[in-house]
Amino acid sequence: MSTAAPEVARTAEAPRYANPYAAGIGLGLVLLAAFCVMGHGIGASGAAAQVVVAGVNAVAPAHAQSNAYARAYLDAGPPLRAWIVWEVLGILIGGFASAALAGRLHWLVERGPRAGRRARLASAVLGGGLMGFASRLARGCTSGQALTGGALLSVGSWVFMIALFASAFAAARLVRRQWT
Amino acid sequence: MILPLYPAGAIGEGASLAVAVATGIAFGVALERAGLGSSRKVAAQFYGTDFTVIRVMFTAIVTAMLGVFALTRVGLLDPSALSVPDTWLVPQLAGGIVFGAGLIVGGLCPGTSCVAASSGHLDGLALMAGMLAGTLGFEEAFPWLARLYDATPLGRFTLPDLLRLPTGAVVAATTTTAVGCFVLLWRHERRRRDA
């Protein structure tokens, strides 16, 4: 089985990624363009909030109206008029197009050499759950707080960024088996 | 001062949503080209074997920061019209700690999970599903979390405010720190390669 059936690749072959400083300058110019055109930066986790609130409102509108957090989103307008929803749609398009052009489109469950597929999918769901919760608490994620607020020198954004790196380095010891 | 365009009414809402898609595409391309759609590459940052995450993030922050500073100095950009994320010290500290744990368990951040998923990585798709679940959990628990969420509001509070320094000094110090960090990483990797 292990030799006959093609095992789903454990990791993307990593040919010719861009120089990280060049990619960083490119990303910084995207952020600067957002500042200059829109007056605000970029985001990601806010789109999840838009989708979740719209979903809760569709299933249980009275329940959504009674929740102060959901109501703030509902009062701000429908998700299809939210800038961040369209921006995240763009991330999906851009990621797909770039991977396709680079020959990096692969169906795979990317994981460490000792990790199984199911365990890796479970850890992805768990990690996503923690970040979904945390980015609502912090009012943003690596995009809306660390990159955007970092470039605008917001104290809270720098606190968030330093805390997340310290926490990730500390927790990395506990999940070493998953990645190495 | 002609920038930023949208708050001044120079472009409308429809155009702003087109800008959103364009911004997202460029953002996705930059992340994918850097290799940050790969969960192993992101996770390797925290085992000291790949420093792409720090290099890309710090370079992007410094690039945008210098751009904002320069455009403000030449009078093209009105910095008071920029939405600086407000500071809520305690929830952002707590959020950062939980987020960091989620990042090393999940191996991708919310933005890079979109790139991973759209390149076919099912772990990226699973992480996006987890994001929705965690967001729903926060929203449903909000009545119990509201006090923490609204704790320690400091408003628009920047590093120059905190340090009582001119913006230019903080911009210079941040740039110097980034370059110093890159030099240390370069020396560290060269040492390890030679060893």
Image (tube, rainbow, N blue to C red):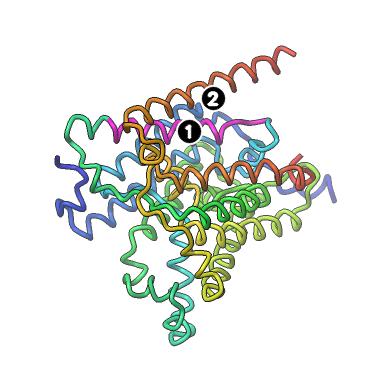
**For the image shown, how many numbered marks are present on the structure?**
2
Q: Amino acid at mark 2?
A: Cys
Chain for disc number 1: B
Residue located at (63% from left, 38% from top)? B41
Badge 2 vs badge 1, beta-carbon distance below 8 Å: yes
Q: Is residue B191 left or right of residue A149?
A: right
* Relative height, residue A48 to residue B84 (above, below): below
Q: Horizontal and vertical percent for residue B170?
A: 38, 31
Residue located at (43% from left, 76% from top)? A68
Residue located at (60% from left, 42% from top)? A165
Question: Who is closer to the viewer here, B1 or B113?
Answer: B1
Which span of residues is magenta-colored?
A: B49-69
Question: Who is closer to the viewer here, A96 or B72?
Answer: B72
Q: Main secondary structure of the magenta part?
A: helix
Residue located at (20% from left, 42% from top)? B78
Q: Horizontal and vertical percent for residue B174?
A: 43, 29
**Local secondary structure at mark 2:** helix
Question: Who is closer to the viewer here, B136 or B83?
Answer: B83
Instruction: Tell me the quadrant of the picture where the N terminus of chain B can be found.
Output: top left
Chain for disc number 2: B
Q: Amino acid at mark 1?
A: Phe
Q: Is residue B50 left or right of residue B67?
A: right
Q: In the drawing, what numbered circle is on residue B58?
A: 1
**Local secondary structure at mark 1:** helix
* Residue B73 falls in image quadrant: top left
Q: Horizontal and vertical percent for residue A44?
A: 45, 54
Q: Horizontal and vertical percent for residue B188?
A: 64, 19
Task: Single out the residue that lies furthest toward the bottom.
Answer: A62
Residue at label 2? B181
* Relative height, residue B102 to residue A129 (above, below): above
Residue B51 in the magenta stretch? The answer is yes
Pointer 2 or 1: first along the chain: 1
